[in-house]
Image (tube, grey):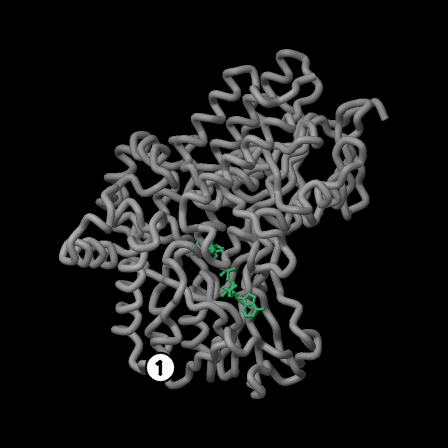
Amino acid sequence: MSRVDIDAVVVGAGFAGMYTLHRLLQDNFKVRSFEAGDDVGGTWYWNRYPGARCDVQSMEYSYTFDDDLQQAWEWTERYAPQPEILSYANHVADRYELRPHITFGTRVVSAHYNEESSFWILSTDGGETLTSQFLIMATGCLSSMNTPDFKGIDSFKGETYHTGQWPQEGVDFTGKRVGVIGTGSSGIQSIPIIAEEADHLTVFQRTANFSVPAHNQLLDEEFIEDIKATYPEFRANNRQMMAGFGSRNERHEDSVLDADETLIQERLEANWQRGGLGFLGAFGDIVIKKEANASVAEFVRNKIREQVVDPKVAELLCPDQVIGCKRLCVDTNYYKTFNRDDVSLVDVKEHPIDEITEKGVVTNGKEYQFDAIVFATGYDAMTGSLLKVDIRGRKGQTLQDKWAAGPRTYLGLSTYGFPNMFTISGPGSPSVLTNMIVSIEQHVNWIRDCLMYMRSNQHQAIEAELDAEDYWVVLANDIAGQTLFKSCNSWYLGANVPGKPRVFMPFIGGLPTYAEICDDVAQDNYRGFTVE
Ligand code: N01
């Protein structure tokens, strides 16, 4: 093969894929995108479960690259519901005329690097084969569903749903006996709403989770105008935050351990009343020191005890791990839902689910019978969607082999042995620990600049060096080791998927530091990369 069809293939048309497409088209790169779904939106296309909404506030969870766009779009709620985010994604696709460049309903099934010509040969499940100089994986971090391999799972005669692939037409649970398995963000958001509809809801909980109130509300005009009047400055301030959002939240850097009990309670109560992920900003060391974490975790447990009438149920809902170690959840009426007569909680920690039968779920010798089972069991996060594609780099090495002991990248953007391939918000980048859209923009802008550099210097291939990758893996691991993030079984560590290597996947050094390193690498002629 000596002919290259296009400059870049972008896999995925969620927020990462759409912005990549837009940015590269602007610079006249010949680029195409392939998307498994029938439309744009990525995670917001698939996650249509009841109550799905973003836990980053709407005025922040949106593209920043075009002031006209951010001035034109009207968010209606503090936390945007899924249908509104999906409308926004559609608006973006139309506004920048992206659809003609996207092949929908089509998966890229393989991508093999051709060393002789330095390009990728791709094939799709639609039977198309094409060659491209660059391969840009915008496949999302939470899009490969995890459905545990429960014994008898296929024998259930009722309806089954996974929160991550909810039917487009919605589901009516009225009059039905429903079982929900899983109490992560998806379970915690959907359980209160399913409870309102169902005849009876049974929740199977393996690990109790910490959740803070969303205090979701309609946005008032004054607030919107205030942000819009200073949007560029607001965005710039957010980019200086560790997580790329929350510059208007109250944030303290002092230690819980230096504060007296009154101050601790005051701060935590104020943050609880404000609601949202900013709760953990009450002190600087909540996710760093175990002793600091303990009093914050106990504060939330007491809030759970206040809300849940039955003390036994309340204790079961009280998490025993470190707070913030698993992704903090943001809810509306979650804990109070367990006060309803038609909702029961079943602990499957001590007695795991034994099997799924024709009629329902068996645990601890008891069969719970259902008309519908909802799997809110999460994702094979960060690597799942990448490893689903048969990606082969130099010497035919598969990405699966390369990452058999866990993902290895340089900057979360590139991996040794796979030239001209980039991952957007991939493992080793701040990604899921940040406002995803801000991280996506940072990655896409970096990749676009890199492609411009390659084009203007007539370079053919760029590849992370092994030393640079080793350095990055050690650095990312060391920083994570200085926190409490490795202390519990979270999907950040791959611990939710049986057999997945236990490696802390995101880069936890904060977005500003990370972006500075990426810029510095680029300015230093792509230090740590071999350019041919
Ligand atoms: O998935 P999860 P999710 N038997 O992995 C349980 C983002 N998100 O879809 O904790 C019994 O968190 C599992 O138990 P355990 C957000 O970043 C954002 O809820 O592993 N239970 C857990 O309770 C979030 O963190 C938003 O012990 C089993 C649950 O299933 C991420 O997506 C909304 C089991 C899975 O929870 C993932 O959230 C939704 C088994 N065999 C999602 N296997 C917002 O923006 C798994 N579980 C608000």
Which image quadrant: the N terminus? top right
The front one of 319 and 241 is 319
Q: Is residue 92 above or below residue 5?
A: below
Percent position of residue 351, x then y: 54, 78
Badge 1 amino acid: Lys
Q: Secondary structure under badge 1?
A: helix
Q: Give percent across and percent down for residue 258.
A: 20, 48
Residue at 63%, 54% in the rendered image = 500
- Disc 1: which residue: 312
**Left or right position of 215 against 262:** right
Residue at (47, 21) in percent of width and height: 520
Q: Is residue 223 above or below residue 236?
A: below
Horizontal and vertical percent position of residue 371: 58, 82
The image quadrant of residue 272 is: bottom left
Query: Where, by quadrant of the figure, is residue 71 drawn?
Result: top left
Label 1: how many Cα within 10 Å (few below 14, some 14–19, many 20+): few
Residue ID at (63%, 61%): 498
Q: Which residue is more in the foreground, 154 or 417?
A: 417
Which residue ends up furthest to the bottom in the rendered image? 366
Question: Which residue corresponds to the image point at 45% horizontal and 60% vertical from the top-left?
Answer: 52
Q: Quadrant of the C terminus?
A: top right
Side (left or right) of 325 relative to 275: right
The location of residue 526, given as percent across then percent down, is: 57, 19
Query: On the image, which quarter does residue 333 sit in?
Result: bottom left
